[in-house]
Amino acid sequence: MTPEEAFDAAMRYENRANPYPYFDELRKTPVVRVTNGIYAVTGYDELIALAHDPRVSSDRRKSHAPSAGDGPVVDESVLAMIEAYDRDPSFIASDPPDHDRARRQCMRFFGPPHSPDVIPSQEPLCQRIVNELLDKAARKNRMDVVDEFAYPLPVNVICRVIGVPIEDEPQFHPWIADAITGLFDLGPDIETEEGQARRAKGEAANLAFKKYIIGLLEKAEKSPGPGMISQLVHDDGPDGRMSPSAIVNNIILLFAAGHDSTVNLISHCVLTVLRNPESIELLRNRPDLIPGAIEEVLRLQSSVQFFPTRSALADIEIAGTTIPRGSPIYLIYAAANRDPRRFPDPDGFDPQRADNEHVGWGRGIHVCFGGPLARLEVNTAFEAFLRRVENPRLIEDPPSYRVSQVFRGPRHLFIDYDGIMPDRR
Amino acid sequence: MNRNSFKDNGRIVIVGASLAGLRAAEGLREEGFRGQLTIIGDEPDEPYDRPPLSKQVLKGWVAADHTKLPRLRQVDAEWRLGVAATALDRANRLVRLADGSEVPGDRLLIATGVRARRWPNAEEAALQGVHTVRTSADAARLQAALAGGPRRVLIIGSGFIGSEVASVCRELGLEVTVTERGPAPLSGALGGVIGTIAAEMQRAAGVDLRTGVSVLALEGDAAGHVRRARLSDGSTLDVDVVVTSLGSIRNVEWLDGCGLAAGFWGVGCDAGCRAFDINAVVTTNVFVAGDIARAPHVLYDYQFLVMEHWDNAVLGARVAAHNMVCDEVDRWAHLLIPQFWSGQFGVNIKSVGVPSFGDEIVFTQGSVKQRRFAAAYGRRGRIVGAVTFNHGKWIEHYRQEIARSGPFPPQPPGFDFPENMRVMPADFPARGVPTEAPDVVLTGHAPSERRAEFRPRQR
């Protein structure tokens, strides 16, 4: 199998439930040129090196990557909006110093030292939501872990943090789902007729969602409210105020990343322990092991498997390969996390794995912004699930997966169970 | 005694009950050592973490007795705390203690670390209000003194401890004078180019920084409390609190006469933590870890390196523990690329490698003006160290470049170019001034201390 074939296979939807054998195949050359001149990085050491290399850019405007196509046919007013709100990319797609400033400006309203209470203060909400969801499930013996358990928690929390009305969920949820399905399918499937239709739908959804966020921003300009949108619009911090286009793009980034990847991790936690039933007893008896077990799930099933922003700004020599200047680079976290040179028994689930410095949160300056919030949410959900759900069983394995290979997770995860214990904490 | 029976029945003594001693004890149990384990420490406290003492503790965020080190596992050891080791009798395999007792053991780990260098005039050093910061008790006393609202604090010496204390004083709104005999703060560890930036940071924060100035005398009042300092620039300062931060002294005195390679720079050992005797012959049963260990390093021309850093204590202790009980073919090397951090004046400083091994410096990323940058140190065309100010997430890149002896100056970044990317002399002070010694030091031998007996060519 050539590297291109392995890469295409890993990207193809039919292998979404288990792309890992193809990552293993790719890793025979830890940094290797694949389809469309992309350099796929699957070795752990090589990924760590490139994630910290100041010659690797995250600003797509600096790469030779082909642009996303001609875009949808739109009217004049939409073009004007794109003109106004596309200028400054989000910080995940920026380099220092812009990246550092934007991340600081956002962190001012999310974490210490300026906002140390934002994340911890979500805990009561997390507990309440999780227990309500389980109470609801107590009336039956089957649930879809994705839709009925994993999804509602993060979306409620991120709405509160960002300042998006949860009442609008029926409106924005399909936009985000369509945008991820249409714009974050980076494999060969997108070239099919069906794929092109998905892409068009995704672009329309992306635009609609952006318009929606712009609406919230304009509203916050007139009347300040709770949440990051309003806080960024009225920011008087040491770095000054972000441009409206940077606010919009960063809010879209945080909002989408802030629930989608968390949903995938919660679902994968449940899936993984149900595949390894002996671990359920262990974690029930020793809840102190749960945080480590979550990290192990993230190592095995990285919620963000890679992110397609990086490119080389110079010829970079690494692991016997020279990445030519301008080439797109995919740091494939999901592959590096199973590098046998770094992790013994890399495909095994060991909730007590020692020395588990996986790259599931990314590394370097782009390391996950929302990690501390995600950890709180996933811990709360997973702990309650283990404690309250009696004798859970998988109905189908593998479950059906979502389309995107970037934000990879089950679309549904049906389980049967004997009952739900009352919340007696 | 074969290996397995040693693991079951051996006796190991660890002298030093701080970070290295504790982690070594845990490492030994992790390795399956089931024999008798004794840990001796001169301080009365259980092992505690020192980095917060000069930062969070002084600021009053954390009580001095709340920095106990987390225990990674049970160690099932006999703890002899509050009693110092006074001698090592290698022939009889005994450690003698200050209370007259003796602790026998088959293998020994030396982890006695360093202590703060005191103000050299004993009478002045004994005045109330004259402090050092090394132990938890030191930090508790100094915190109380700072909380009492002194009119002015004088800090003598502007290495990392002195600079961190000065930073805390300014955050507490206290007037503070820092005297530094050298040209700039931190210049021993990071050189004059970075020292100049550190000096600007101090002055911008309102520190009365006086470089090239030493303190001639400290004077007390009738009650024996320090009140004045006379400086070499001719001035006199009214001060209520004096912090002497003059670097450290290795706790080797208890090893006098035992025949080990112990001296000013610590206890010589191989890269596997096995102690050398005075002739540089490696011992079998004596191991060294932490601040006091001094071992040759492959990256730095096999020169001996001492590293007064947290990760050196943790990782060195782990290697020592392994090598104390493993098979000969299974020994590990402790070849650390040193790394440390400091927090002062709102800036997170991180460093990797051995900057003072370099003689040139170049800014590689960020902005010096905005105090967020990375700089690399080079020697003979290769990178040997790096420092970051509020740029710590890049340190891994420099660690990797140092590990592979990458080129100096390094390739330029792709973005965020510093204002000035010229290679400059790093401007380290001349070697030999003990109070200006960096925390990572390449330690050549001192010929005056040489006691080796050379083997004659002919018998």
Image (cartoon, coloured by chain):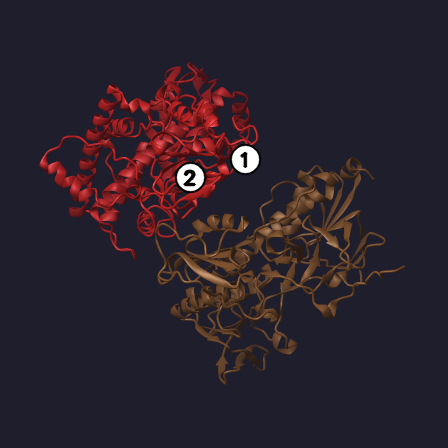
- From what the image shows, is residue A241 above or below residue A292? below
- From what the image shows, is residue B458 above or below residue A14? below
Q: Secondary structure at mark 1?
A: loop
Residue B385, horizontal then vertical, whole percent = 52, 56
Report crowding for label 1: few under 14, some 14 to 19, many 20 or more residues within 10 A (C-alpha).
Answer: some
Most extreme residue toward the right, as rendered? B459
Colour chain A is painted in: red
Q: Is residue B107 visible?
A: yes
Q: Is residue B434 left or right of residue A262?
A: right
Callout 1 amino acid: Arg
- From what the image shows, is residue A141 above or below residue B136? above
Q: Is residue B124 left or right of residue B365?
A: right
Q: Which mark is residue A362?
A: 2
Residue B73, horizontal then vertical, whole percent = 63, 40
Q: Secondary structure at mark 2?
A: loop
Q: Quadrant of the N terminus of chain B?
A: top right
Of marks 2 and 1, the one in the foreground = 1
Q: Is residue B169 visible?
A: no
Most extreme residue toward the bottom, as rendered? B234
Label 2 to label 1, Cα distance in Å?
Answer: 16 Å
Callout 2 amino acid: Gly
Q: Which mark is residue A390?
A: none
Provide the residue designation for mark 1: A342
Chain letter belonging to callout 2: A
Chain letter for brown?
A: B
Going from the N terminus, do you reach mark 2 or mark 1 first?
1
